[in-house]
Image (cartoon, helix red, strand yellow):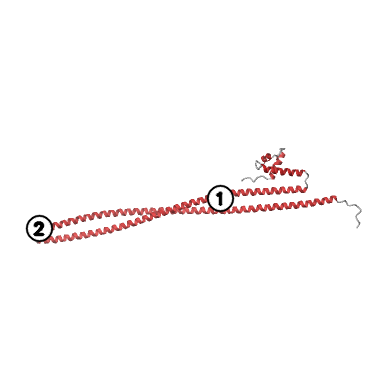
Amino acid sequence: MARGGINKALVQKARQVILTRGENPSIDAVRVELGNTGSKTTIHRYLKEIEEAERGRQTAPSLSEQLGNLVSLLAEQLREEAQAAVAQEREQLALERLDYQDQIRQAESRIEQLEGQSSTLGEQLNAAQQTLQHEQQKCQQVELENARLAQANADLEMRLIDRDSQIASLEDKHEHARDALEHYRQASKDQREQDQRRHEAQVQQLQVELRQLRQTLIIKQDELTQLNRDNARLLTEARQMQKDQRAQEQHLTQKTQALEIARSTLTGMERTNDALEQRCRALQDEVARLGEATDAQAQRAQGLQERLSEALAQLKLLRHAPPAVPGNASSP
């Protein structure tokens, strides 16, 4: 803590020590004795007041003057000590206030940083939610595509059944035609052979179409299998994104709790600052009370000086009063 300064009593004490050593109490000597503190102007003023007081005492001052000087010196010393104490307290309070203001600024900076992190995490969470919605939409589209392919597969199976029915019907017709040709072999041999060739061509064509339909069905089944695999992969990615989202939400909760703790710390600092301001006001009231006490002591000293003057006046009257003559007093 910084020193509160010098006063007249310290200067007088240092001057007396220098005189005791038999040295000249100059301004520099007194300042060295005080520990190289205080301005030379102040030391010079105090030395001048002390020397004038001593010259006044050397001219045989009265008792009332000595008492007044003593009371004035004590009052001056008391006021200077009180002012020095108040100055020290004010300086300490100023240092403490600066310290708390630095802490408050650091807390505000930390709060701004946490709020920025919270905003960033919120943006990341929104982006993750949008990505999850997009993936869900893709999953829905894949499911719709699977349903469409399943319907197409069912349609192909129905077409195969129709083709099989047509082939069976043609085979039946062929049997009937062959039976009929047996009856008319001799009469319509050429016609029968022509019909048989046409029928065989149709059968071959139908067989070719059947093979093509079966190959198409195999391809569609492979595509359906691949789509099922993609759907499983997308579901796995969606679950992983949900886990990441929950982790980000927990991290955001931790950041929010840290922000609440910082805000509580800031509230405590504000309360401490209010307490320091109340203490400062109390010290100011104490300074005012000390000033009033000093004024009261000065009034008491003035009253004592007046009473002493009256006592000295009565003493002078008693000294100058004529002595009583024996025998002149009337007998009772």
Q: Which mark is residue 101?
A: 1
Nearer to the camera, 331 or 89: 89
**Horizontal placement of 99 versus 73: left or right?**
left
Specify few, some or many for label 1: CA neighbours under 10 Å numbering under 14, 14-19, or 20 or more: some
Specify few, some or many for label 2: CA neighbours under 10 Å numbering under 14, 14-19, or 20 or more: few
Give the quadrant of residue 130: bottom left
Q: Residue at x 37, y 53 (%)?
A: 237
Please identify the residue farthest to the left as the structure is shown: 186
**Horizontal placement of 105 versus 122: left or right?**
right
Where residue 219 sits: x, y (%)?
26, 53
How far apart marks 2 and 1 lie (CA) works out to: 118 Å
Please indicate, yes or no, whether residue 247 appears anywhere in the rendered image: no
| Labels 2 and 1 touching (C-beta < 8 A) | no
Task: State the quadrant of the C terminus.
Answer: bottom right
**Horizontal placement of 177 versus 83: left or right?**
left
Please indicate, yes or no, whether residue 259 appears anywhere in the rendered image: yes
Total residue callouts: 2
Q: Which residue is mark 2?
A: 190
Q: Residue at x 17, y 60 (%)?
A: 170
Where residue 165 sits: x, y (%)?
20, 60
Q: Which mark is residue 148?
A: none
Label 2: which secondary element = helix
Label 1: which secondary element = helix
Which amino acid lies under the numbered mark 2 shown in the image of this protein?
Answer: Asp
First reached walking from the N terminus: tag 2 or tag 1: 1
Which amino acid lies under the numbered mark 1 shown in the image of this protein?
Answer: Gln
Where residue 173 sits: x, y (%)?
15, 61
Where residue 32 sits: x, y (%)?
66, 39
